[in-house]
Amino acid sequence: MFFNWMKTAVLLALLSGLLLFVGNYLGGQQGLTIALGMAFLMNFASYWFSDKIVLAMYGAKPISETDAPGLHKLVEELSARAGIPKPRLYLMQTHVPNAFATGRNPAHGVVAVTTGLLQTLDRRELGGVLAHELSHIKHYDTLIATMAATIAAAISYLGHMLYFFGGRGGSDRDDRPNPGIALAMMIVAPFIAGLIQMAVSRSREYAADERGARIAGEAGALASALRKLQAAAHARPFAGAQATEHLFIVNPFRGLRGFQLFSTHPSTEERVRRLEALAAELGG
């Protein structure tokens, strides 16, 4: 678990360093200042408003205890085991089974589930999925993933903005970056940033699987749920913004198996394999 945190810290540091490097190379001192300003403003906005934005994007509505007393009771029990406040619950109206967590910290945690998830999974499997999402909230994965996505987006915007609207400050042409190298950086830097962001997301998914299984007290239920969710994503991919795919428990937009380097999620097969190995340790 310590290795996962170190890996995440290193990847976030690489993203931040890449942002500053791109800003400095393409815009000099002015570009560096712009990069820092963009990073601050985008992270400030995502910290305070990312949960509201993503819930609105998917038309998620609050779930009252009257409408779903069993779901609320299950989340309350799992939250107590996780040692965090009970998060707010939201429902997305779609038959595709999936779920995600958001919120800047455990005190402002949110878990959103689809109608398809509630219809597809039994109580044990649902508990495994909810425990996975509570783990994300407890360990600030929702904030980390938002930061990674925001910095990656800032690198892309910054590269395009500085290339087309100014380059390095000052009138000396010798001080400006080589146009060919600048163009290559504008293309390559966002690509590298995307790869790093995806690596951050995959690392946190593995950790949330393990921690969620320990919260639920068993690993087999989550493994069974992941199989069902992956099969559903394969049969009918979700309609939504791909910029949010890292939030969901399984990638809802890419049901087909793809090159893992370009995926926000580890392969479901590998996640299930690890959970089955953990099941022996947990006794279930």
Image: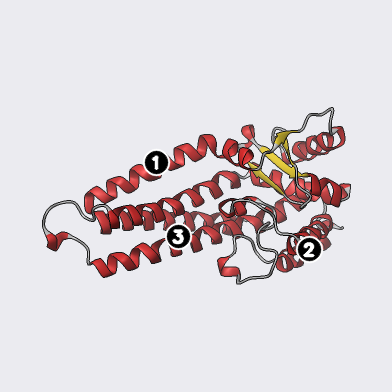
From the viewer's perspective, is 17 left or right of 220? left
**Residue where numbered disc 1 is placed:** 40
For the C terminus, the image quarter is bottom right
In the rendered structure, find residue 193 and report the number of the disc placed on it: 3
Give the camera-side residue of 167 and 192.
167
Considering only order in the chain, which callout, 1 or 3, is on the residue closer to the N terminus?
1
Considering only order in the chain, which callout, 1 or 2, is on the residue closer to the N terminus?
1
Residue 4 versus residue 79 in the image, above or below: below
From the viewer's perspective, is 14 left or right of 63? left
Residue 26 versus residue 133 in the image, above or below: below
Residue type, mark 3 in image? Ala
**Residue where numbered disc 2 is placed:** 231
Give the residue displayed 28% in from the left and 64% down from the top.
182
Residue 201 lies in what quarter of the image? bottom right
Residue type, mark 2 in image? Ala
Residue 52 lies in what quarter of the image? top right
